[in-house]
Amino acid sequence: MITAIWPSYAKLHNHLPAAAGITTKGMISYFIYHVVQTPFLFIRTEKLKWMFLAKTILVPPMALAMVIYLAVAAKGAPDFWDQKSTVTGSTRVWLWLSSMTSITGGFSTLAVNIPDFSRFAKKPGSQVWQLPFIPIFKIVVSIFGVVGASASKPLYGTILWSPLDIIAQWQGSDGGRAAAFFCGALWALAQICVNISANSVSFGNGMSLNSGSI
């Protein structure tokens, strides 16, 4: 988002060593993100329902639009829909296990956090609806990722799994920067909502229960 407004931000000199695992630009961006997010942590969750509703309405169409754009732009590549596996044998097996572990980690986080919200449900069993929908959403998001990454190779010369890395490729024109800004803003909104619902609320409930028991 910052680069879309000030393109020179992308060329900010890095003063951190490679061992830091982050660049100066990344550290500044991380700090700015938390400055933006922190005020929302002091607002009662039920008062943030409109923000969560906005995320629910705006983010999925934006993600779908990104996937459609990438697929249409890369349709001329002969191997876009027919890319072959580049790994075999034990390497492929371990990659499958690693991927399944990653997906399971996402499931586990959501499953553990369900009681933080279902305790406020009007009827017992309301949380049962989570059971079919979590796998469905995981599968859809995985498909989006595979299609987007597959399309990024013929378009940008390398496989890009992160939507933010893909957005970074759009900074070469005014229209591209505008698209990058609005997509980045919606991804930032999604990340703030996830951090609040999946991390802050669960932590707050756990701390309040522990302090009550003490």
Image: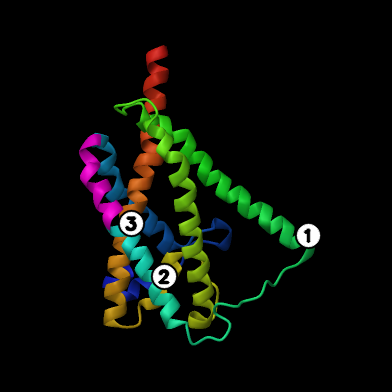
Q: Nearer the viewer, mark 2 or mark 3?
A: 2
Q: Position of residue 109 (x, y in %)?
A: 49, 40
Residue beneath disc 3: 188
Name the secondary structure under disc 3. helix
Q: Position of residue 116 (x, y in %)?
A: 38, 30
Task: Please indicate, yes or no, whether residue 1 appears anywhere in the rendered image.
Answer: no
Quadrant, the C terminus: top left
- Mark 2: which amino acid? Val
Asked whether 174 falls inside the magenta stretch, the response is no
Residue in front for this viewpoint, 212 or 28: 212
Residue 72 horizontal side relative to residue 179, left or right: right
Return the disc, 2 or 1, that comes first in the chain's sequence. 2
Dividing the picture into quadrants, the one containing residue 80 is bottom right
Stretch of the chain drawn in magenta: 46-57
Q: Residue at x 54, y 58 (%)?
A: 21
Q: Residue at x 41, y 39 (%)?
A: 129
- Mark 3: which amino acid? Ala
- Mark 1: which amino acid? Ser
Return the disc, 2 or 3, that comes first in the chain's sequence. 2
Q: Residue at x 49, y 80 (%)?
A: 156
Dividing the picture into quadrants, the one containing residue 4 is bottom left
Residue beneath disc 2: 67
